[in-house]
Structure formats: structure tokens, C-alpha cells
Image (spheres, coloured by chain):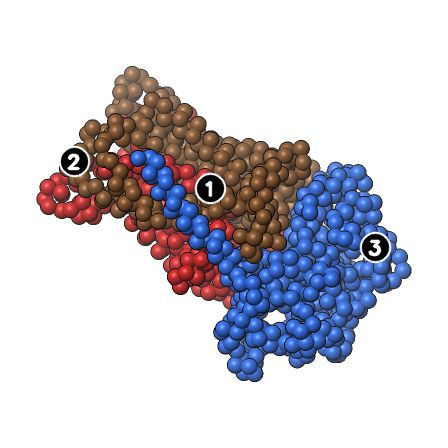
Amino acid sequence: MSSPHSPMAPPRSFLWSRRIFLTLLTGFVLLPVYVMVSSSLKPLADVTGQFHWLPSELTIRPYIDIWSTIPLARYFVNSLIVAGAATVCSVVIAVFAAYAVSRYDFRGKRVFTVTVLSTQMFPGILFLLPLFLIYVNIGNATGIALFGSRGGLILTYLTFSLPFSIWMLIGYLDSVPRDLDEAALVDGCGPLGALFRVVVPAAIPGIVAVAVYAFMTAWGEVLFASVMTNDTTRTLAVGLQGYSTLNNVYWNQIMAASLVVSVPVVAGFLLLQRYLVAGLTAGAVK
Amino acid sequence: MRRTRVAAAGAVTASLLTLVTACGGGSSTSDGSNDSPKTLTYWASNQGASIEVDKKVLQPELDKFEKQTGIKVKVEVVPWSDLLNRILTATTSGQGPDVLNIGNTWSASLQATGALLPWNAKNYAAIGGKDRFVDSALGSTGAQGQDPAAVPLYSMAYALYYNKQLFADAGISKPPATWDELIADGKKIQAKGKSALGAEGANLSENIHHVFVFARQHGGDFFTPDGKPDFTNDKVVAAVKQYVDLMAKDKVIPTGDAEYAQNQSVSDFAKGNQAMLLWQSASANLESQGMSADKYGIAPVPVQSGTPGTGTQVNSAVMGINLAVFKNTDNIDGAKKFVKFMTSDAEQKILNTAYSSIPPVKSVQSDSTFSSGANKVLKDTLATSAAALPQVADESQFETAVGTAVKELFADAAAGRAVTTDSVKAALEKAQQQMPTK
Amino acid sequence: MTTTAPAEQSVDKTPSGAAHPHPRRRPGRIRRIGLPYLLLLPALLLELLVHLVPMVIGTVMSFKELTQFYIRDWGAAPWSGLDNYKVSVDFDAPVGEALLHSFLVTVAFTLLSVGLCWLIGTAAAVFMQDTFRGRGLLRALFLVPYALPVYAAVITWVFMFQHDNGLVNHVLHDQLHLTDKPSFWLIGDNSFWALLTVSVWKGWPFAFLIVMAGLQNIPGELYEAAALDGAGLWQQIRRITLPSLRPVNQVLLLVLFLWTFNDFNTPYVLFGRSAPEAADLISVHIYQASFVTWNFGTGSAMSVLLLLFLLVVTGVYLLLTTRGRKPADV
């Protein structure tokens, strides 16, 4: 982004503050990352001993062991499926809802937006057990296995990310000029045609932003995943705890596994960063 | 108009609510059925070095069972961090496994839910009779006067693990048999620059196991005979204080241990930085951390004076894992067959060897595997000087409340604050008031 | 459930002034009465299923005596009226006292955490508004805490906060000699600061993202005008940048507040099922009350009280911050 500031060169005080601040902040952010990387390359005995900045002995053993201590690959795939599906569904549903709120006037609009916001106030603990019961009963009544399956988890997570997604998208769609979809309507598209052919393409950055947020929500959730999954459907967020066993905490393997599973996410994140920044702009500014 | 909308929303909510509460619990009250006689679901607890190791241990045995009975057992090894929550949600919803492992201290609490199959004489007869099991293990299967909620599977007891080399360096010829001796030996070891005794000060369960034994040694108990909490009687206060004083006054437990909750004290011991450890069945764990069996000795946990026995000479809680059956199983006969299989002599020997635990089955205990070395100390402790933790429905509340009190007292000691009889009593008073009132 | 939409549709469509704050919107052209409701339906159904109905059930639970004796069959659990609430708000008794303490700790923690997250996020975004060498790389690095799985991130901090072997004491005590003896971070009074550190580390990148995005929407002419008036860079930041961020901050601070207040994962991974008193956040406290001690009735009552508190706070906040703005922008 080009600078919106005046063409004047920034004053010295600004440059120095910036240098000091960003250096400190980088240190703060990177410290745990460094610990993760260095610990993941140490034998367990070193990791459980006195901390040293430099490993006395380097080993890639943890990176081999992580795959056999727990079924890491399966958890990783589960997490990708759950977070991926939750993201796609959440985005589609949020776009529909945001489009309705942004483009139509109807009774109950305010009730809807306020209700959606209020769901952010529920402590997760309050609805963990009730939700579990509902899923079980739906399963008993219809034969659709929601609890213990990836489907149930997808449903849960996509709803978790809906409120904030809808809020952000309303703002973003509001800023897509209405003339665009009205022109499409005049050209004979239906309202849905206008949404998909004109509004969605114009809103891609905002949609990407929402998608990243939805993905991260599903990716990191621990509490619901711990009771709603079983061995075959367990996600990473919960599965990583398997490195902490009854006898021992395999710190080096935790760190190694965390790094391995985070690399694809961070990489994807960086690829989408450009869209993300542009997208959040309009969504957050009403 | 608004009223219509509110009414509609109310109707929807109400109907959903009815759907949920009508089937609420969803669990049948009958004693199970035989609707699917060919399969069983089994939740195993994590006993070995990792979940994957457990699967490798269990799967061949389950295959044997399938061969014998034609029943296929789907096993899931549930991590300890999730096990109790999973059991609770299973209990609430009626959607659970057929057979499951429970920590034996949970027996009475889970028994109170009524979700587990009671092991009355008839059910016990189906697995070969109650008298196959040793008494100490049976003492931890549910509240007294009720049919047990579970069957003993693996037994464990606490022992004093000591580092032979560090003892020799400090000129100590035999492991301490009393707490006074332990403190005196500890001083000698500290003089050589090593730490004396390890503890897991922030681990609620470990705290409970230890203060329970200290209470017994003081002749006290955390509960009155009719099951009411009684945490503030002088004997219990003295007991808790004695345990915390190992850090606060006697200083044989390093202050750093106050925050331990993830078995760091075992690592300290395995690395030779610490001379003594009070632990249950630590052999496999120490081995996995590179400490071979010839490096350490195993002795009974110290007592106040004399030798371990019953009454005030108790020196361990009865630890272990029980096997329970969910009442609403749809393969009740198969579940009982599976329990019978898992507690059979052959399986008991295989599984308890794999997990370095002691079999609760009498006929297997006498096997040579469990009568030598480390196992002998553990077996003798279980047989003669171990007591069951309180078998009350509020056991888990007790663990949380008192375990937290001890954790906070350790934190005080570590921060250099005084731990006095009054402060211990105040902490226990607070714990007691958090207990359910009925 | 499906009755909702038809019920809504049958509502008289007469425009009521308040519902039409934007005369520039021309709904007449694309009016199809059922369509907006149809578009909202999936979101509505999901919110009902996953958020709203469970919350109603949770509220019902709070009026029951739901201990381990009854969890197997909720219908049989006796109604306990307001008993669970009475226990929760009896601040002279240990349970209520502990809840109040936990509540106050949570409020203090949330205010500090949100404040710091916002401050760091805003400062970083403002400082990184201009291009400079390495800006792209830094922006990427700053997103790493947000992208790590929560468990992995927090357990790493646990590792660093260890008393004997942790990095924090290694630096503060062994290398900088700032303390006489190593401090405890995971137990005792310092645990509050440990929790705050982790929470800020994890939370600020989100604030950074949102503010950074918000900055890009400030029209360049504003700065130019200010520059013509002779305002320096610092003054521009104070007079233009910060006021222009107000609408962004309104949403950002609110969601950060709600998320931080209800955060369960961070304290749970950091301290386990029993948090030290100094860092006894309400979410873990309620978890302990319901799942660890198996008293779901009291746990639910506490949750409902918490919900009411957050509703009031949010209501007041929205009233204060939107005063004078268009009501439909809520």
C-alpha cells in the first residue's frame, strides 16, 4: 500500500520509535518460536534439563518419532477436513446472510443482527453438554451420526465462526456499489445471479478474510473437539495432547509436531495475506 | 405482529426443547440387551508409554477374544486428559462404549450416576466369582454396602524409589523406613549437592494420594464413617501439614517441585539429580527415560515408626484401574464375556506385565513374574499396607477441593510464606465448604 | 423450526420509519418478499441449533439440581428453583466468594489484555503504514502467533515459564540477575502476569490485522489537508489516524473483550484443571464447577449470570459508542 502520509520525510523521533518498537515486538513474537524450533531439535533429556539458548546436541529424532507416538498424520487430515469444510460452509452461509442484510429491508433485520452478535457472549461451557445432547438425540431420531463424527464438528465450528463472519461481510457488501448488482438485475439476472456474478467477485478479498478467520476458529478449538471426537475423528488441537502421556511429556515432540502442522497453515496464510488485509478494510469499517 | 413472531420463536424453541428433554439422557433403565451380540466398543485408558503403544499391546489380545467368542471389540485408547469428560458426556447422553476402563478412585462417583452395571453376585458369578480378586483391589470398586460398579483390572501401589549411587555417595546404607529417617537421609544427600525427594505439588491427584496416606498414619480420615466430609479435624490438619512441611520446614522437597504437574519429578529422578521418588509402578517410565533397573532400589513408603501394616501403618493408597460395563449396552452377555476374558489368568499375566502393574487376581499374583524385585514390594504393599481412598460419591469433588488446597499450600511454601497449623486448617476449611452439602 | 420463515413472511410489509434508514437503498427494484428470509434461513437454523437452543437448555439446567446422581436422566433431576443462583451469588460463603474473586480477576485480566492487544496492534499498524525495507517479512512474522494451534502455542509458554528449567527464569535470573532467586510463574501470584503475557502474545496479531486494514480506508486527502496546515507526522497520527479508526475500534474492542472474557483454551492449557487463585479465570472456574465437580446445575447458573453481565456490558457499550450514529448500523 502506498503511504497516505504527507510527502514529508518522517521525523527522526518517528523513525527511532519505530525501530525500537518493532525490534522489541519482533523479539516478543519470535521468542516462543525460537524455543519451539530449538527444542524440537534436542533429545528429550536436554529438553527436560536446564534451558540453554544453543542445543548442545542436535537431533532430528523428534521429527521421526512424532509420527509413531500418536497418529499425527490422521489427526492432521481430520483437522484439514473439518476446518476446510467448516470454512467453505461458513463462508457460503455468511455470504447469503450478509447479502440479505445488506441489500434488503425486511422486518426482523435488527433482531437478526443483534441476536447474531449476542451469541458471542455465550460461554462455551454453557452449551457444551446441551449441544452434545442435541446431537445425540438427532442421531437417535434420524440416524444421522453427528456426535463423534466429523460432520458434527463441522456443523459446530461453522456456526462458531458465523456471527463474526456475517458482521464483517455485511460491512464489506455494503461498500460494494449497489449500481453493480442493479445493473446485473437490469440485464436479466435474478437476485442470486447478481450475487454470484457481480457481488461475490467484487467481494473476494472480504470473503478471503472471513475464510481465514473461520479456518483458524476451527483449527484451534480444543474443548468441543475433546468430547465430540473419537480416535478416528480426533483433530490436531486435541490430538497434540497425546504427546503428554501418563508417564512423560515429550516436549521435543510436541514442538516438532506443532511446527510441522503449522508450516502449511502459516504458508497458506502468507499467500492469502494480501487479500486478507484488503478484505478486512471494508469489513471492519462501517 | 411482534407478538406473533415471539410466539413462533417460542413454539420452535419449546418443541426442540421437548425433543431434547423427552429423550433426555436417552439411556434406558433396563440392564442392557443383546441386540448386537457380535460387537463391543471398549474405551481403554492410556497405561503404556503412549496411545499407540497401548493399541499394540491390546490388539493381539482382542484378536484372541474375537477368535474365542466371535465378538469383535473396537478399542479406543482415550487419553487421560479426555477420559472423565468422555465418560460424563456418555453418561449424560446414553451414547457410550459397552465396556470401559475407569480410574479406581472414580468408582464411587460413577457408581452414583447409576450408569454402570452393578456387579452383584450373579454378574460376578458370570466372570468366575468375586473371590478370585484380592480384597484390597475390591475395596476400590464402589461405595461400601452397594454392589460394586466395576471389576479390578490392574493394581498399583506407591513405593519409595531411591537412587543407589546417590545413596552410596551420601553414605546411606539402607533406604529410610520412617519419615524421620527420610528427612535425615535427605539432609545427607543435600550436603552432596543433590536434591532429596521429588513431589508433584501442582498435581491434584498426587497430592490427594499422599495426604490420604499421611492422614491414615495420623489415625485420621477425610470423611466421617457415614460419608460426611471432615477435613478440619486435628489429625487431618497435622497430616496435611506434615506432607507440605517436607518442603516448607524439612526442606527435603525442592521448592521448584511446587509447580510440577507433568511428572517432572520422575525426570529429575531418572536423570540422577534427585535421590528419592514416591511413585506408583515407575519402572517402565524410568526405563523409557534411560534409567535402567539396576540403578535404583525400591522400598516401601516410609511410615511414622515401626513397619508398614494396617491402621496407622498404612503406606499407600490402593491405586489401579477398574473395568466397568455401561448398563445400557446392547451386548450385555458379550460385555460380561469380555470382562471375564480380561480378568482371566492368562490375560492378567500378559497385560499386567506389559504395563508393569500388579494383577488384582489372586491366582496370578503368586506367579513368579510378580513375586520378584520391584514387583514384590508393590505386591506386599497392596496385600498388607494399602488402603482404599474414600469410596464416597463426592470423591472427585474431594480430590479437586483438597488437592487444590494442598497445591496452594505448596505454592505458599515455595514463595517462602509460612505454613502453619492455622494456615493449613484455613485452607482445608475452605476446601470443606466447597463440598456439596448433602 | 421451519415455521419461523413463513411466520416472518406473513408479517405486514408496511415500512416502519426505523427500518428504512437508508432512502438511497431502493428495495422496490429487487423486492421479492421471501428471498431475504430464504437467504438468512441457513444461518438462522444453525444459530438456533448450535447456539440458541443449547443456551436455552443450559438456562433450564441452571434451575435443576444436576449433580452426578441425576445426569443420566435429566428429566428426573429435581427442580431447585433459584438455589443454584443463590449459592453462586452468596458472596459470604466460599462458593460465591470464589466466584466473585474469579469474576474480578477475569475483569482485570480482560481489560488489561484487550487494552494491551489493542495498543500493540495499533502501534504496530501505524508504524508499519509506510513502506520500509523488511515490512512484508515483519507482517508475515507478526501473524505467526495467530496461526499456531492454541495448544502448541500455550504449551510452549508453559515450557518457557517453568521454575527450574524455563527460559524466562534463565534470562531474568541467570543472565540478567534481575531477581534474587528464580520466580514461580505457573503457581502463586505471578501466574496472573504469565497468563496476561500469553494472552497478549496470542491476541495482538488479530488487533494488528484489523487496525492495519482500517488504516487503509482513511482518505489520503485528510492527511494532505493536515500537512498543509503544518501538522507534523505525530500530530497527523493523533488528529487524523486515531479518530478515523473509531468505527474499526468499536467492533474490534467489543469482540476482543467478549472473546478474551470467555477464553477457555489459554488458561486451561496453561494451568490445567485447577488454576492458581491469582489467575482463576471465570471460564475455567465454571468448567471446574460443572465438569470437575460434576455439578452442572451450579455451573450453568454461573454461566447464565456471566451471560447477563456480558449482555449488560455490551448493551451499554453499544449505546455509548453508537449514540448519534445511524441505529441500523448496529
**Hue of chain A?**
red
Give the distance between the C-alpha atoms of the residues marked 2 and 1, in whole angstroms.
Answer: 38 Å
Look at mark 3 in the image and give the residue it sits on. B217
Look at mark 1 in the image and give the residue it sits on. A122
Labels 2 and 1 in the same subunit: no
Residue A230 can be seen in this image: yes
Left or right: C294 in relation to C234: right
> Residue at left 29%, top 24%?
C223
Q: Quadrant of residue A279?
A: top left
> Residue at left 58%, top 48%?
C78
Q: Which numbered tag is attached to residue C28? A: 2
Residue B42 appears at what percent x and percent y?
A: 55, 69
The residue tagged with tag 2: helix, strand or loop?
A: helix
Q: Name which residue type carries label 2.
A: Gly
| Residue found farthest to the top | C229
Q: Name which residue type carries label 3.
A: Gln
